[in-house]
Every structure is written in C-alpha cells, then in structure tokens.
Image (tube, helix red, strand yellow):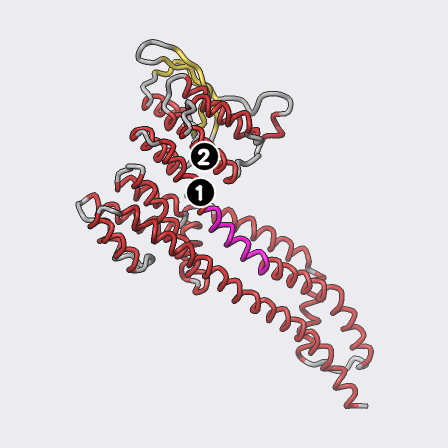
Amino acid sequence: MAEFTYTATTKEGKSSSSKMTAPNEAAVRASLARQGLTPIAIKKSGGGSGPLAFLAFGKRIKLKDLVVFTRQLATMINAGVPLVRSLATMQEQTENPVFKKHIADIGKDVEGGTSFADALEKHNSVFSPIYINMVRAGEAGGILDEILKKLAVQQEKDARIRGKFKSAMTYPIVLLTITFGVFIALMTIVVPKIGKIIQDLTNGSELPTTTKILVGISGFIINFWYIHVIVIFGGGFLLLRYLKTPKGRRRRDIIMLKTPAIKIVVTKMAIARFSRIFASLMTAGVTVLDSIEITAKAIGNAVIEDELMAAAKDVANGQPFSVPLSKSRVFPPIVSQMLAIGEETGETSTVLLKVADFYEEEVDAAVDGLSSILEPMLILVMGAMVGLIAAAVIGPISNLSNQI
C-alpha cells in the first residue's frame, strides 16, 4: 500500500484535494470514479512529514484501538452528535499517531461530502472489507450507530478468541524453547566434559553405543556449529517467505486441517468466525453473495475460503446457501441445518449468532484441551532427553564398576 495525494472535481465543478491509501494509481482513479469525482492530479506522497515522522513509521494500529474507536463513535452518533464532529473528537483523543492521521483524513473527506464508507475505503489498510461494507449498509439504512455497535462486538469476540488461543499456546512454546536451550547447553557444555572424564576412567576401552552416539552428536554440534546456524536461520527465513505465498498459505492451511489436535481448534474457530461475520453482514443488509465472498476472505483459511467461494457459485445459480454448505468437508452438518432453519424462518442472522455463541464456547474448551495435551507431551520429551543423557553417562560407569 502507498499513500497518494490527489486533486479532483465534483460533477458541480467544485475542486477538492485530499489523500488516499491504495495499492497503485489505478486503484485511486477507480475509487474516485465510484465517488463521482474526476481526478485532475494524482501524486504519490513521500515517506513522511516532519523530522519525527520516522517515529510513527511501522507503528501498527492495534485491534484494541479500532474497537474503542468503533464503540465510542457508535455512542456519539446514537447521542445525536454529527458524524464530522464525532470524528474530530475521536481524532483528538486517539493516542496512536498513525491512527490519528487516518481519522483526520477520513474526517476531511466526510466534511467535503464523501460518504463515511467511501472515506473508509481510502484507508483499506486499516479498515477491512467487512467493516467498510457494513458501514455502507448502515448508512443506506440509516442505522449507522447500530451497525457500529455490532462491528465493535464482532471485533471484541474475534480478539477474545485469538487472545485465548495465543495465551494457551504461550506456555507450550516457552517450554519448547527452554527444552531446546537445555539440550544445546547439555550437548555443548556438559556432554563433552563428561565424555572426556569417562574416556579417562575407562582407559580408552570401548564405550556403550548410547554414549558413543551422544558424544558424536555433541562433537558434530560443536565442530560444525555454523552449519546449524545457517540451517536454522536460513531455513526459517525461507519457510516464512514460502508461507507468505498463496501456495505456501494453502499448504499450511491443509496441514492444519489434517493435524488431529490442531484441526479441532482451527475448525471451531473458523465456524465461530464465519457465523458471526456472516450474521453481522446479513443484519446490515448486505446481499447474500457479497456476504459469502467477504466472509470467505475474512476467515483466514484458504481451504475454507475455496469451499465458501464454490458455495457462492451455487447460490448465484439459485440454490439456498444451506444446500452447498451441507456438502462441506470442514463445516459439520449442524451448521448447514441451522442455516436451513434460518432461511426457512427468515431469521438467518439470529440463528447464526446462536451458532457463533455455541462455537465460541467450544473454542475455549478445545484450546484448553489442546494446551493440556501439549504440556505433558513436552514435559515427556524433556524428561526423555535428560534420561538419555543420564543413561549415556551411567552406562560406562556401571561397566567400569563391574570390571573392578
């Protein structure tokens, strides 16, 4: 994404200048055309403004900032405060300098006559397609405050699920890191010294196989340490780059959906997120096809995205959404059955919100279960590692005592 400064005229001939974040100049022209503006000049902005601009560079806009902005903006609009004034107030009290600048630009666009949704669309690096489409539907229906409240709730639920998963994985990751560190320390410091002592005690006699293997591994790590550094850091760098490609992302998602313990958590998280986002979009008045496409891209799993996009084609051909969803290899039958009930009764959003609530509770239980499985497994690995080293040391000493 890059920032562009543009000057454009309205149909009435009024000229205005502003900024827009977009992938390229063509995207800027397309966005201006949707707003009924004729571009006069479009220039790519510089890297920043002011001597301290570098301090704000790369500072992320946290989800918490976005949730607070959304909820407070909804409260102010509900209280009858005009949107332009509400945005000005939010700009003043926002501490994040990057987010403050985005809000200022949005406020200028809205004050100049641009719709709130179109103003947000210029900052699509901050506001997701879900956010923008729901705001657009809220503006069209005159229920912007209600839509913003629903957006805030959806973001809070999403953040809670992600936070729950991250916190559950923190202990196993720390334990795995400690295990790796202990292994390196033992193999590079402890084992060489013990190996030398044992060889001196046995006067060069044949060592047990376990001891020889352990000493050999230790020597390889010490003598060829640069190979391990290159493999670890180089492999990690290449792996991260591969995972950022569409092929790598798809391969990662396939593996996650095939790994027994992780599959349960990933699937339930995807169902909970799908149900809440789709229900929110339907409540906002977004069409079924647009809701499916937006939700598919928001779930964050390429395999599930493919299934939903294929379902969208069937819906476009006249089938109810519940029919192609019932053929899914990821979504359990209860989701399509509940969706079918919602379609029959006209309460699709209500039914899916109940599904979301249920699976969010299931995610909590699944994450706790995954954590309880991983912790003893890692402790077992650490114990086995220490036991192997102990056996390699005790074995030759025992043989030596028997000979004596």
User: The residue under label 2 is which amino acid type?
Assistant: Thr
On the question of residue 289 being in view, the answer is yes
> Could you tell me residue 235's position as x and y percent?
56, 53
Q: Are the residues at dot 2 and dot 1 in contact (C-beta closer than 8 Å)? A: yes
Is 1 or 154 nearer to us in this picture?
154
Magenta includes 170?
A: yes
Locate the C terminus and report the quarter of the image it occupies.
bottom right
Chain part drawn in magenta: 158-172
Check disc 2 and report its element: helix, strand or loop: helix
**In percent of the image, x 44 and y 47: which residue is there?**
157
Residue 60 in the magenta stretch? The answer is no
Q: Is residue 13 above or below residue 359?
A: above
Residue 401 location, quadrant: bottom right
Label 1: which secondary element: helix
The residue where tag 1 is placed is: 155
- The three-letter amino acid code for the residue at tag 1 is Gln
The residue lying at 30 percent from left, 40 percent from top is 283
